[in-house]
Amino acid sequence: MIRLGFLNGLIYPNNGFSYENNGGTIIFRGKCRIGNDSYLSVGHDATVVFGDDFRNNAGAKICSVYGIQFGKCTSLGWNVLILDTNFHPIMDIVTNKTKKMGGEIIIGDYNWFGAYCKVLHSVKTPERCIFALGSIVTRATPVKSYCVSNSDKIIINNVIRTDLN
């Protein structure tokens, strides 16, 4: 039901799956497959939830300090980075207030992230989104259900990935 670190992408080292849990919670809601050369790091207050039928062939990097929820049938291409924190506080020099360092990520059902995508903190996506190769997904990324989006615009509307239910 849960496969972590299997050899599937021959261009990636066969180093399995690395896992670091600093006291957080990981929940599997069903089948989960994460391929070789992948990493999961969970902070002490974080909860990471993998929806049923989570898929990644190789190279996933998932780091959570605040929390990440993947909907059912989420698919990650090679070398996708999911990061709910920027780790380093920054200050607004006009107001002298520290900016928010991170926030929970919520990925809708049937989302597909192409190879080399980066999903940054505080992102929430609806169901059935496709993110093009190399997209940087932030709160400002335009996205809606049944579309293909890249970092700054919706490329195609009214589409669905056919190999997922």
Image: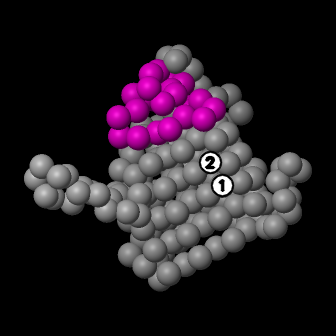
In the rendered structure, the answer to whether residue 99 lies left or right of residue 148 reads left
Tell me the amino acid under the disc marked 2.
Val
Viewer can see residue 93: yes
Residue 22 is tagged as none
Give the secondary structure at mark 2. Answer: loop
Work out whether residue 146 can be spotted: no
- Circle 2: is it few (<14), some (14-19), or many (20+) Cα within 10 Å? many
Residue that numbered label 2 is attached to: 80
The x and y percentages for residue 42 are 51, 71
Mark 1 Cα within 10 Å, few/some/many (few <14, many 20+)?
A: many
Task: Please name the colour scheme applied to the rendered image.
Answer: one colour
Q: Position of residue 148 (x, y in %)?
A: 54, 25
Any magenta on residue 134? yes
The percent coordinates of residue 43 (x first, y second) are 46, 74
Where 133 falls versus 85 (above or below)?
Answer: above
Considering the image in quadrants, where does the C terminus appear? top right
Q: Quadrant of residue 28?
A: bottom right
Q: Which residue is mark 1?
A: 60
Please name the residue shown 64% across and 73% down the image: 19
**Residue found at x 79% / y 67%:** 16
- Three-letter residue code for mark 1: Ala
Q: CA distance from mark 2 to mark 1?
A: 5 Å
Residue at 46% x, 44% y: name it.
Answer: 108
Q: Is residue 131 above or below residue 81?
A: above
142 relative to 114 in the view: left or right: left
Q: Main secondary structure of the magenta part?
A: loop
Q: Quadrant of the N terminus?
A: bottom right
Dot placed on the residue nearer the N-terminal end, 2 or 1? 1
The magenta region covers: 130-154
> Where in the figure is residue 125, as x and y percent of width and height?
42, 40
**Number of disc labels:** 2
Query: Marks 2 and 1: CB-CB under 8 Å?
Result: yes
